[in-house]
């Protein structure tokens, strides 16, 4: 199901707000020179929703901590593994229930000492989700 123009616009504005907040707090990614896209260190907590049709609610939720943020995605530290290409929903875990959920796709998940380093790519057209 594709997102409406209004929903997509709201999500893009949400990400622009995240980027503005991250850039105000400083901390450009030290690896930025080697990467195609500049990322900004940013470590807020996010809530992730994973579609699970077998659950009564249709989705399971857990919390992760941000590592860095770019125009097209976010890197997070997670206590839980996620498979590559899994579609998820992401929002700031700041207690504001009115924040919009942003669709994303797992592009990598690597085991690290404290859980998993997960890279998420933002998706704005739900038809793109795998």
Image (tube, rainbow, N blue to C red):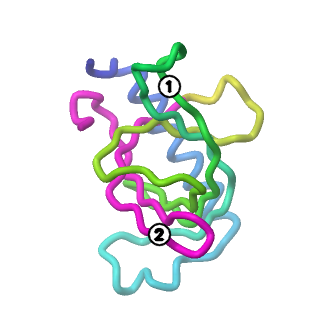
Specify which label sits upstream in the sequence, 1 or 2: 1
- Image height of 1 relative to 23, above or below: above
Instruction: Please give left or right for residue 93 compared with residue 17 in the image.
Output: right
Q: Mark 1 and 2 residues: CB-CB less than 8 Å, in contact? A: no
Query: For the image shown, how many numbered marks are present on the structure?
Result: 2
- Quarter of the image for residue 108 reads bottom left
Q: Which mark is residue 59?
A: 1
Please state the horizontal and vertical placement of residue 22, each as a whole percent of the image. Answer: 62, 60
Instruction: Please give left or right for residue 69 compared with residue 73 in the image.
Output: right
Q: Which mark is residue 2?
A: none
- The residue sitting at 43% across, 38% down in the picture is 88
Of helix, strand and loop, which one carries label 1?
A: strand
Please state the horizontal and vertical placement of residue 72, each as a whole percent of the image. Answer: 37, 54
- The residue sitting at 24% across, 37% down in the picture is 130
Please state the horizontal and vertical placement of residue 80, each as a whole percent of the image. Answer: 54, 52
Instruction: Decide whether the magenta segment is chiefly helix, strand or loop.
Output: strand
- Image height of 25 relative to 89, above or below: below
- The residue sitting at 38% across, 46% down in the picture is 122
Instruction: Please give left or right for residue 8 compared with residue 79 in the image.
Output: left
User: Which residue range is magenta in the image?
Assistant: 101-130
- Quarter of the image for residue 87 reads top left
Report the front residue among 18 and 92.
92
- Image height of 56 relative to 26, above or below: above
Q: Quadrant of the N terminus?
A: top left
Of helix, strand and loop, which one carries label 2?
A: strand
Quickly name the residue at label 2: 111
Report the front residue among 108 and 97.
108
């Amino acid at each position: 199901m594709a997102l409406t123009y209004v929903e997509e616009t709201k999500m893009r504005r949400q990400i622009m707000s995240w980027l503005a907040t991250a850039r105000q707090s400083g901390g450009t990614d030290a690896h930025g020179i080697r990467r195609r896209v500049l990322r900004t260190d940013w470590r807020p907590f996010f809530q992730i929703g994973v579609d699970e049709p077998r659950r009564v609610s249709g989705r399971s939720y857990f919390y992760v901590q941000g590592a860095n943020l770019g125009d097209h995605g976010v890197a997070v530290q997670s206590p839980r593994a996620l498979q590559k290409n899994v579609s998820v929903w992401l929002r700031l875990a700041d207690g504001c229930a009115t924040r919009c959920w942003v669709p994303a796709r797992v592009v990598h998940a690597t085991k690290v000492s404290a859980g998993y380093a997960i890279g998420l790519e933002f998706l704005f057209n739900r038809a793109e989700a795998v």
